[in-house]
Image (cartoon, grey):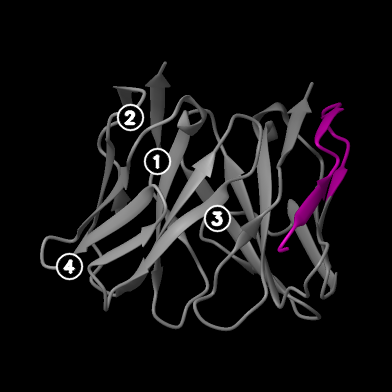
Amino acid sequence: DQQVKQNSPSLSVQEGRISILNCDYTNSMFDYFLWYKKYPAEGPTFLISISSIKDKNEDGRFTVFLNKSAKHLSLHIVPSQPGDSAVYFCAAQKGGSEKLVFGKGMKLTVNP
Amino acid sequence: GAVVSQHPSWVICKSGTSVKIECRSLDFQATTMFWYRQFPKQSLMLMATSNEGSKATYEQGVEKDKFLINHASLTLSTLTVTSAHPEDSSFYICSASPGGLPYEQYFGPGTRLTVT
């Protein structure tokens, strides 16, 4: 049973435009959400996170929005750059647990 | 900061042999380390959680006798794949957590295991 879902396997955008990556979750016990970026044959690198007490967190070009009632979060990248091309994983954590539950990932391609 | 290394980065072994993968936190002490496995175009699947000095906690469906995990110190955890089979071929990734909220994990670069 997939508790964290990234329903779109891929996204292609033009350089300079906005990239919006979506993530849905089913477990209402999750209270911390993270986005990781992964290049082929490398481990994931932490990008940005958000606590369930917030609905928005911004870090430079990256903004994560959380809609708890819809159990939905999204990552916005503005402006998108070719170096952003990678697989992006959404992950969630339950309160008090160190375990991360990952979505299947979404491949973002930013075209020059 | 928060660098995690893995060794080797890739390994080829024959069926029936064992292979050990090391995971080290280089600039922090990791109270907890995690081992993941990733199949092509799939999510990262948590295999086990290990705390220094205690037995690892395995996820459902993961054979503890096949995937031996040792967390000998606050900076080192090892995963040994015993009696490897071709179906064990995968990308294995470790992560380490320094502890404390919000329990962020820092990932190693991964190890590509190919069993022939």
Q: Amino acid at mark 4?
A: Lys
Mark 2 or 1, nearer chain start:
2
Residue at 78 percent across and 37 percent down: it is B84
Chain label for disc 4 = A
Q: Amino acid at mark 3?
A: Leu
Residue A105 appears in which quarter of the rendering?
top left
Q: Any mark on residue A68, and which?
A: 4
For label 3, the SS is strand
From the image, tell me which residue sits under label 3.
Answer: B46
From the image, tell me which residue sits under label 1.
Answer: A104
Chain label for disc 1 = A
Relative height, residue B58 to residue B10 (above, below): below
- Say whether mark 4 and mark 2 are on the same chain: yes
Q: Please report contact status of discs 4 and 3: CB closer than 8 Å, yes or no.
A: no
Disc 2 to disc 3, C-alpha distance: 21 Å
Q: Amino acid at mark 1?
A: Lys
Left or right: residue A9 versus residue B5 is left
Q: Any mark on residue A9, and which?
A: 2
Magenta stretch, residue numbers: B1-21
Between circles 2 and 3, the one closer to the viewer is 2
Residue B7 lies in the magenta stretch:
yes
Residues packed near mark 4 inside 10 Å, few (<14), some (14 to 19) or many (20 plus)? some
Residue B16 appears in which quarter of the rendering?
top right
For label 1, the SS is loop
In the image, residue A78 lies at what x, y percent? 32, 40
